[in-house]
Amino acid sequence: MMIDPPPPTEGAHRFFGERLPHAEAFAAVLADTGVSHGLIGPREVPILWERHILNCAVIEDAFGEGACLIDVGSGAGLPGVALAIARPDLDVHLVEPMQRRTDWLESTVDEVGLDNVTVHRGRAEEFHGRLSAPYVTARAVARLDKLARWCFPLVEQDGQLVALKGRSVEDELAATTKALRKEGLVRAEVTSHGAAVLETPTLTVTCYVRHRR
């Protein structure tokens, strides 16, 4: 049974503007097949905007104009689909290993009406040497040191991994910096996004990557 999605928050209206119908379509899909496919829990539906859609979309300010980005472990299209809605100029590639989820992602992209998204089935490691972009992003996938092993090879020279993280991001970064440097980290910075439209802003850690030549 479909659960009615919550109406857009005031922050969603302000943030998405004319793109709001696409965001609402995404919310409707998440509340319906997103739940039935086990991509989000039914208890998450009432907080879809704050906890998921807006939470992800506000990191759009981390990416340059017309940029190409790879979303690793896209799952429910978070953050990839949310970013593609917020920024139609972005070229977004969703990487997800499970066939059932990639089928859902392709259907969702079509239903939401996005023409700037490509879905790839496979683990991140399978795309090393085959797929790369100036930006790679991930949400709730793994600790930074493991994420670096999977994602840094997808980041183009002098590009960035932009990982969504929780409140303990500073501690996690401190604990993993040595391992990250071995993988090619030049520097890292923690950034807050969306304070104007979210009660709890989103935190990201941006890892600047330089590959060994």
Image: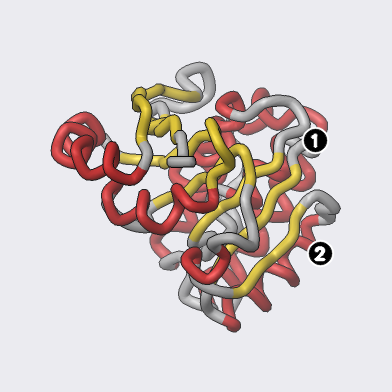
Which secondary structure, mark 2? Answer: helix
Residue 128: x and y in percent read: 54, 62
Q: Which residue is mark 2?
A: 110
Residue 109: x and y in percent read: 75, 61
Q: How many marks?
A: 2
Query: Would you say residue 27 is visible in this rendering?
Result: no
Residue 79: x and y in percent read: 55, 48
Image quarter where the N terminus lies is: bottom right
- Residue ranking furthest to the bottom: 99
Q: Residue at x 47, y 66 (%)?
A: 125
In the figure, residue 121 lies in which quadrant? bottom right
Q: Residues within 10 Å of mark 1 (few under 14, many from 20)?
A: some
- Residue placed most toward the observer, 73 or 167: 73
> Is residue 16 found left or right of 9 in the rendered image?
right
- Residue placed most toward the observer, 162 or 127: 127
Q: Is residue 44 above or below residue 162?
A: below
Q: Is residue 198 above or below residue 93?
A: above
> Is residue 190 found left or right of 208 in the rendered image?
left
- Residue placed most toward the observer, 56 or 22: 56
Q: Are marks 1 and 2 in contact (CB under 8 Å)?
A: no
Query: Type of residue at label 2?
Result: Asp
Q: Residues within 10 Å of mark 2 (few under 14, many from 20)?
A: few
- Residue ranking furthest to the front: 213
> Is residue 47 found left or right of 159 in the rendered image?
left
Q: Residue at x 54, y 44 (%)?
A: 155
In the figure, residue 179 lies in which quadrant? top left
Residue 152: x and y in percent read: 45, 48
Q: Nearer the viewer, mark 1 or mark 2?
A: 1
Query: Would you say residue 62 is visible in this rendering?
Result: yes
Q: Which residue is mark 1?
A: 89
